[in-house]
């Protein structure tokens, strides 16, 4: 019996290491990819760029790398045009237009992609004072202090007409909902999350322990979101990433908690000493006869279907929405940064597909006890799939009025935490009893 107990403990330790490995690898991968794609390119934020441009005797120039037609239609007042096509045709310092020689060039595009390409190319031609403006025009619009701006804080056309950056007059009810969202709904689900973690703190059953961890990640992620708003005015990519990754992990751990709870408490599929609840459907059980498991075969349908659904975010379009508004006297910007979109509709579905494929392979190839690792990898795939799909639906549906996207995201989180509380209360008499590992 001691040997058996030790074997079970060793197996459990391996599963915990597997979970930790997935979290660490999944968390570091986006940061490494960001550094490879964006981090190695010299860059400045819009606020830093304007500080350089407004310095006395400054040699800095704001260079719009969009096409001439786009530039003539409307551009940031004070910017000069040098299209990306012409930049890429430049191969030495001598080919740089005279007005840009020996200057500090701050390159800007719609969302930062073209500016990145232009910066990378010019740096390769030995130009030293070249920087990409992070987030492009999309982020620049959110860097102004009020609806009326001076040079660099307003639009200008080729004909000389000047007008303000995109501004949306929010109705009173939207302003009220925005305040309720930020100062009632978000604090409410954060307080409920903390209370839920304390209630579940001593729980040792696998499903409740996974649920506790999922709520912890949600709580930490939402605190990072609050820090980003209070101290960085939503401009910190790092804290926004921690917010998103916390939500992703919450999706994954809650999924695992549901799977484990259904298995150990209702279906009894993993318990070798108890009849499976689906026995009346299968007629014969894999525990007592050499036949395929019906529930396992069902997952050969569920997992491929989930893989197909993971392609939904991959087919979504990117949005460059950015506009300013006033919420009860406070100037506020709504935008959806490109790096967030790349994480949510590119990295998340790819990560989901990878984990779901691994889960399918475990079920298909592993002959002995495939369910524990298959459940872990399946939940690890549903995490990014669920989070990425939710964000895609909200931001695509409300791309022209992002207040609603923020509102329904916070409302969904409140519904999740409140729903968990209700379920735990309903089944409190038996749910907190230990179940067999």
Image (cartoon, grey):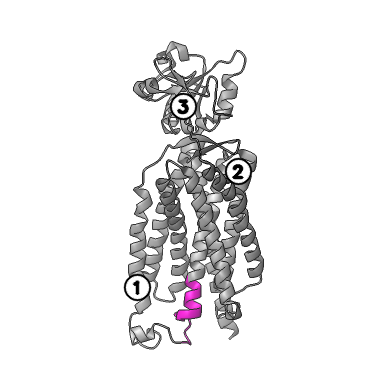
Q: Which residue reaches farthest top?
A: 98
The x, y position of residue 139, in whole percent, is: 50, 33
Label of residue 108 in the image: 3
Segment tinted magenta in the rendering: 259-274
Label of residue 234 in the image: none
Q: Residue at x 47, y 87 (%)?
A: 274
Image quadrant where one finds the C terminus: bottom right
Q: In the image, 217: left or right of 117?
A: right
Q: Residues within 10 Å of mark 2 (few under 14, many from 20)?
A: many
Relative to 75, residue 320 above or below: below
Q: Residue at x 60, y 36 (%)?
A: 330
Q: Which residue is mark 2?
A: 228
Q: Which residue reaches farthest front?
A: 172
Q: CA distance from mark 1 to mark 3?
A: 51 Å
Q: Which residue is mark 1?
A: 298
Circles 1 and 2, Cβ within 8 Å, touching? The answer is no
* Badge 2 or badge 3: first in the primary sequence: 3
The x, y position of residue 147, in whole percent, is: 54, 28
Report which quarter residue 276 is drawn in: bottom left
Q: Residues within 10 Å of mark 1 (few under 14, many from 20)?
A: few
The x, y position of residue 325, in whole percent, is: 53, 35
Q: CA distance from mark 1 to mark 2?
A: 43 Å
């Amino acid at each position: 019996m001691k040997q058996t107990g030790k074997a079970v403990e060793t197996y459990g330790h391996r599963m915990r290491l597997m979970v930790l490995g997935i979290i660490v690898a999944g968390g570091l991968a986006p940061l490494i990819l960001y550094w490879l794609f964006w981090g190695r390119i010299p860059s400045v934020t819009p606020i830093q760029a304007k500080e350089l441009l407004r310095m006395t005797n400054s040699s800095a120039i704001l260079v719009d790398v969009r096409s001439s037609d786009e530039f003539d239609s409307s551009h940031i007042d004070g910017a000069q045009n040098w299209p990306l096509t012409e930049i890429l045709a430049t191969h030495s310092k001598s080919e740089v237009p005279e007005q840009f020689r020996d200057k500090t060039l701050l390159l800007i595009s719609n969302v930062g992609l073209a500016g990145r390409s232009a910066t990378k190319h010019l740096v390769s031609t030995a130009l030293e004072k070249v920087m990409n403006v992070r987030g492009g025009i999309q982020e620049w619009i959110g860097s102004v202090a009020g609806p009326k701006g001076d040079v660099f804080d307003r639009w200008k056309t080729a004909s000389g007409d000047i007008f303000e950056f995109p501004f949306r007059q929010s109705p009173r009810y939207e302003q009220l909902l925005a305040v309720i969202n930020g100062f009632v709904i978000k604090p409410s689900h954060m307080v409920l999350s903390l209370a839920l973690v304390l209630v579940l703190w001593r729980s040792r059953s696998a499903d409740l322990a996974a649920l506790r961890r999922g709520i912890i990640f949600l709580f930490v992620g939402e605190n990072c979101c609050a820090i980003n708003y209070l101290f960085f005015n939503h401009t910190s990519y790092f804290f926004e990433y921690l917010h998103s990754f916390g939500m992703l992990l919450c999706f994954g751990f809650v999924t695992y908690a549901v799977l484990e709870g259904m298995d150990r408490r209702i279906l009894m599929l993993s318990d070798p000493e108890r009849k499976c609840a689906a026995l009346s459907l299968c007629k014969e059980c894999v525990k007592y006869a050499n036949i395929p498991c019906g529930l396992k075969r069902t997952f050969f349908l569920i997992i491929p279907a989930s893989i197909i659904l993971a392609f939904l975010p991959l087919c979504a379009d990117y949005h460059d929405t950015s506009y300013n508004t006033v919420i009860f006297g406070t100037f506020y910007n709504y935008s959806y940064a490109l790096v967030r979109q790349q994480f949510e509709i590119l990295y998340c579905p790819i990560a989901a597909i990878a984990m779901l494929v691994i889960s399918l392979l475990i079920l298909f190839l592993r002959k002995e006890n495939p369910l524990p690792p298959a459940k872990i990898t399946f939940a690890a795939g549903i995490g990014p799939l669920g989070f990425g799909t939710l964000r895609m639906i909200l931001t695509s549906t409300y791309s022209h009025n992002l207040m609603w996207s923020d509102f329904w995201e916070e409302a969904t989180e409140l519904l999740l935490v409140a729903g968990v509380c209700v379920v735990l209360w309903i089944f409190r008499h038996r749910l907190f009893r230990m179940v067999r590992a």
